[in-house]
Amino acid sequence: MSGKELKPEDLVQIELSPPAGDWMNPRVGFRKGTWNYAAVPDTLAYLGLPNAGKWQPSDAEWPLPDNWQEIIHNGMKERLEKYRSFKVFMDICVRCGACADKCHFYIGSGDPKNMPVLRAELLRSIYRHDFTASGKILGKIAGGRPLTREVIKEWFYYFFQCTECRRCSVFCPYGIDTAEITMIGRELLSLLGLGIEWVCTPLANCYRTGNHLGIPPHAFKDSLEFAVDELEEITGVRVHAPINKKGAKILFVAPSADYYASPHYFTLLGYLALFHELGLDYTWSSYASEGGNFGLFHSHEMMKRLNAKIYAEAKRLGVRWILGGECGHMWRVLHQYMDTMNGPADFLNVPVSPITGTRFENAASTKMVHISEFTADLIRHGKLNLDPKRNEHWVATYHDSCNTARAMGLLEEPRYIIRHVANNFHEMPENTIREQTFCCGSGAGLGTDENMEMRLRGGLPRANAVRYVQEKFGVNVLLCMCAIDKAALTPLMEYWVPDVTVAGVHELVGNALVMKGEKARTTDLRGTPMKGCDGAAREKAQDV
Amino acid sequence: MKILVPLVAVMALATAAYFGAGSFGGQYLFGVIAPYAAIMLFIPGIVYRVVNWAKSPVPFRIPVTCGQQRSLPWIKHSKLDNPAGTAGVVGRMALEVLLFRSLFRQTKAEIHQGPPFRVVQGSDKYLWLGALVFHWSLLVICIRHCRFFIEPVPNLVLAVQSLDGLFQVRLPPVLITDVLILGALVYLWARRLINAQVRYISLAADHFPLLLLLGIAGTGLFMRHFDKVDLIAAKQLTRGLVGFAPVVPEGVAPVFFMHIFLVCVLVAYFPISKLTHMGGIFFSPTRNLANNSRAKRHINPWNYPVKVHTYEEYEDEFRDLMKAADMPVEKE
């Protein structure tokens, strides 16, 4: 991990005041630790995408196709005609600067081109030069500049230094959304065959095996069975994890990290315990074994190509509706794109909770419910036997994932659950949570080791807010509902706020859930001893 | 360059009008031809812009949600910051357009080296206040100016005018919005010059309209309070323009021509500049869409079939492994 060599006290020497000079001269130093490796040609070829061959961003000369300028020009033209967002956002920015210091990468790096406004201007300047009369005539005075190879390098560096978190858009008086601009920018780069490995390899994996990690069906089954065994060891209850079960009522789709990475894994145990306790008639799918969608970080077309599996599998298995696990960008795709891209899902029913009878009208068309909506509804109806004392060893705070906060508005559901499964919960400062939440710094496919310095910088505002509640309230666990968060916040906490652990909301649900026929619980789902919880439960029993 | 070029440009435009006003030909050029030319550029320009935006579809429903979604009935829904239907969207847009809701959230990031080291997001309402004061003052001033164009002067215009002069300082009364707009413009421009981040991102195209507006407000105030312009003559000219019977009356001071010419430049410049944010805000898909994409299907007019990896292809590749693992398969 390259970030380990960097000392926190050096990293925080950040100057938020930009240097003298003009940003318009393209200048990128590909400093080690601040960029991602290039995509491998084979993966792009597998997906039928253009590729630039073998290259790395640090190369002096990038292997661009001969007609690269024409490709970009036509690509921009096509997208201006297809996306009103792109066209309007190219035209109406007044550079008021409201967004400037809202970006976690800017706050953490001080690099002026990480101000959202300038990130967009990198593209806007070309737009003005090539597509507007004033830019064509007045050039630089009108804010236009010609498209050069250096500009392409700059795009690559800064569009892969944006996590599409949309925080800037919250503050923009016109709602200009840098995520849109970055998405279009990355699409344009991919037309030249320029992509990053950490996005494109998961794409190819997911296309082939159904999940980003490239886990084949039998290994998928193995890992779920392993989890079932482990849950039995902890709780004494043998649960069942059905896979590809035709005729099940509900298809459950979670991010693949949940069954292959830590600390995601403990959330998986939570899901399994919960579904068992409810007697839910559901199934996992090996073909649709990925809720996440790295297509969002590549292009609209790739997003659609991967997302298509979820509805296709729901149809094949004959389920009634779909339940989705804890993930951020997954929910951006499911909530804002899936139905439009691959719907209508007229072969499914409007989701109804088989336990409470609640009809999820908010998912009436897409037919996919977020697990925290599902669980909050269960708790509200008193359907779960929860003992929050079993989470007494945790003093929790909650990190809103960017996508569920700003592309959905899923704010209260997780908090409602947390308050019912844990007694110690403290919010971070208000300008760092809910719709103003700070990104983990590793979203949108940027979570690589080679990019560690930039990730630590980008995660600084979030980490600092955690540090604040750690010092004030003794917070020792950072809860989140996003697979990328769970992977990214863990090293982030190790670096900036040691002693704070990262956990999923349904991990704490699993801890608190009193299961029928369970043995006396001595440890939580991690296998760590629970602070006097069962003592408390026993006392309760004696009182009665 | 970014500051100098627009500064020189505005000064040159004003000077040209000042000297041009010395001859009848010049007065006709700046007082009659320029306004018609400006309007002829403005109207088709704005129509082109709006039609051009409208021509590009909105393929996906991508509101930026700034509050609690509508989900379960017992969870309080944030109707304006995360609207679920048309009424909410109208409310959200009204807040955005009339009160600059998003700017009101403004914070300022600061790094305190400490100890303890802190990244702080403090509240910072100055930009919101400056922008709001400027835009509302401009609106009131535009309404007030209707008295130069409409006869008889509508009651609304008269009411706005008298309300604006409420404080009755000096004669003619100093108008509140005149003071406010000047103050707001000075603040907004000073901010561009002094705030290092904003200075860095500012283009010539950002300084130019501010300087133009400062010139317009300055000449307007000058005419009203210092070198008082013959109002009757000025009205003759403006009403002549509206009635398509242009006249250039005698006795109109040069500063009037400076004022009207700078306005003309602003109006003509409007459609080809960032000033189109006025119309563009209404087209912003992150603000003008309801967050109901799971409840109601949004249609993408250019949705096209894509190449997917079908279940059949998947099973063909993994069938043996699946069977060995006792997993159900479609084809034995």
Image: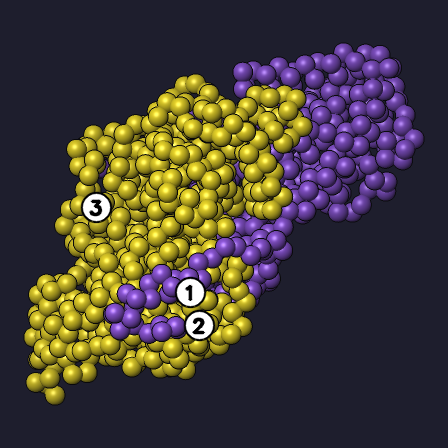
Neighbour class for label 3 at 10 Å: few (<14), some, many (≥20)? many
Quickly name the residue at label 2: A316
Q: What mark, if any, has residue B311 been given in the picture?
A: 1
Q: Nearer the viewer, residue A60 or A472?
A: A60
Indicate which label's residue lies in the foreground, 3 or 2: 2
Residue at left 68%, top 47%? B55
Amino acid carrying label 1: it is Tyr
User: Does dot 1 land on a helix, a strand or a loop?
Assistant: helix
Q: Chain of mark 3?
A: A
Q: Is residue A49 left or right of residue B174?
A: left
Image chain in purple: B
Image: A135 above or below A375: above
Residue contact at pointers 2 and 1, CB within 8 angstroms: yes
Indicate which label's residue lies in the foreground, 2 or 1: 1
Amino acid carrying label 3: it is Pro
Quickly name the residue at label 3: A491
Which quarter of the rendered picture does the N terminus of chain A lie within? top left
Looking at the picture, how far across and down is residue A472, in whole percent?
19, 50
Amino acid carrying label 2: it is Arg
Q: What mark, if any, has residue B128 been given in the picture?
A: none
- Between the residue at mark 3 and the residue at mark 2, the CA separation in whole angstroms equals 40 Å
